[in-house]
Image (cartoon, rainbow, N blue to C red):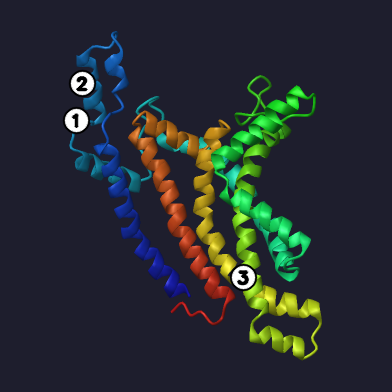
């Protein structure tokens, strides 16, 4: 197991280097630069713009700037923001906790609800409960995240206020007027977390139901029933345990998708996280910040795959990771 993990970690190094090279090249080949907006400002002289470009190294070839960025990144220096001259590490350190505060609860809630709903749907196949949960799972799975977020804002943020009901804040991470306490931040998280949870919950519920239906029809489950074992023992010890093994892989591979979904949700709800920082940096050609955000999602993806493979090997003795 240790040799497998070490071998995989070593293999991730060229993969991440290749991703960083391709992303950096694409960003710098797109028309525009951090100084593009300055060109329309009559109070800034062209000579000043050229001096800024020279100081930022924007006049150097993009591949030369890539190796400069890579050398600094390996030392823990992600550069400075071209917009506000703040260190990129400070920007990321401020935004990442907010993204984690949305993504981690949504993963926990989605798993906590998807497992019992999916299992019960399989055990009570074609019942009223199964039909209702299947319909809602299909609806939310097919629903675009941005549309779902906007509907949440309209209903629970706008209409509830008009109806005189307790309503939720529609944007931001906290109330700027009061500074925001613990419960204020929780209130600002409710709608984004629910939006992320519903999208993940819908897909995972359908997946678990399908896996459970397939498992309870296996020969070893019928054999356990024939031996006279209790219904609960057959379901939980034999069927459920084996049906949940593929879910480990699904969750590991879905973690980057959930963080990617937070990119959309954060911009819909004006929530200051990695997703909103990434969109702002792309709109302003702020290459250093954009590279840090993209590499964050890339690292999540490759390590999500690694964790899924390792956990699958740990939980299933039939899988050998040598």
Q: Nearer the viewer, mark 3 or mark 1?
A: 3
Q: Which residue is mark 3?
A: 211
Residue 244 vertical position relative to residue 113 in the rendered view, above or below: below
At label 1, counting other C-alpha atoms closer than 10 Å, the crowd grade (few under 14, some 14-19, many 20 or more) is few
Q: Is residue 107 visible?
A: no
At label 3, counting other C-alpha atoms closer than 10 Å, the crowd grade (few under 14, some 14-19, many 20 or more) is many
- Name the side, left or right, on which 35 lies relative to 280: left
Q: Could you tell which of marks 3 and 2 lies nearer the N-terminus?
A: 2
Residue 123 vertical position relative to residue 150 in the rendered view, above or below: below
Secondary structure found at label 2 = helix
Q: Which mark is residue 250?
A: none
Q: Could you tell which of marks 3 and 1 lies nearer the N-terminus?
A: 1
Residue at 57%, 66% in the rendered image: 248
- Front-most of residues 198 and 184: 198
At label 2, counting other C-alpha atoms closer than 10 Å, the crowd grade (few under 14, some 14-19, many 20 or more) is some
Q: Which residue is mark 2?
A: 50
Q: Which mark is residue 59?
A: 1
Quadrant showing the C terminus? bottom left
Q: Residue 19 location, x and y as percent? A: 33, 52
Secondary structure found at label 1 = loop
CB-based contact (under 8 Å), mark 2 and mark 1: yes
Q: Residue 35 location, x and y as percent? A: 29, 23
Secondary structure found at label 3 = helix
Q: Residue 180 location, x and y as percent? A: 67, 27
């Amino acid at each position: 197991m240790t040799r497998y993990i070490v071998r995989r970690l070593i293999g991730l190094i060229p993969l991440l280097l290749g991703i960083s090279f391709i992303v950096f090249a694409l960003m710098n080949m797109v028309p525009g630069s951090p100084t593009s907006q300055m060109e329309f400002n009559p109070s800034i002289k062209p000579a000043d713009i050229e001096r800024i470009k020279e100081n930022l190294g924007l006049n150097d070839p993009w591949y030369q700037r890539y190796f400069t960025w890579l050398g600094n990144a390996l030392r823990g220096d992600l550069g400075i923001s071209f917009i506000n001259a703040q260190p990129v590490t400070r920007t990321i350190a401020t935004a990442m906790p907010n993204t984690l505060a949305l993504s981690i609860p949504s993963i926990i809630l989605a798993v906590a609800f998807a497992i019992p709903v999916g299992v019960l749907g399989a055990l009570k196949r074609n019942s009223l409960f199964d039909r209702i949960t299947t319909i809602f799972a299909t609806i939310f799975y097919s629903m675009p995240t941005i549309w779902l977020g906007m509907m949440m804002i309209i209903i629970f943020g706008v209409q509830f206020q008009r109806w005189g009901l307790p309503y939720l804040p529609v944007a931001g991470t906290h109330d700027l007027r009061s500074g925001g306490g613990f419960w204020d931040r929780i209130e600002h998280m409710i709608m984004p977390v629910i939006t992320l949870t519903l999208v993940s919950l819908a897909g995972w519920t359908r997946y678990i139901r399908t896996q459970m239906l397939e498992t309870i029809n296996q020969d070893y489950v019928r054999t356990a029933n024939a031996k006279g074992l209790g219904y609960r023992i057959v379901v939980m010890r034999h069927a459920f345990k084996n049906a949940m093994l593929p879910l480990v892989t699904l969750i590991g591979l879905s973690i980057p998708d959930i963080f990617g979904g937070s990119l959309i949700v954060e911009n819909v709800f004006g929530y200051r996280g990695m997703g909103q920082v990434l969109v702002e940096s792309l709109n302003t050609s702020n290459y250093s910040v954009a590279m840090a955000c993209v590499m964050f999602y890339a690292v999540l993806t490759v390590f999500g795959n690694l964790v899924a493979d390792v956990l699958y090997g740990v939980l299933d003795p039939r899988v050998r990771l040598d």
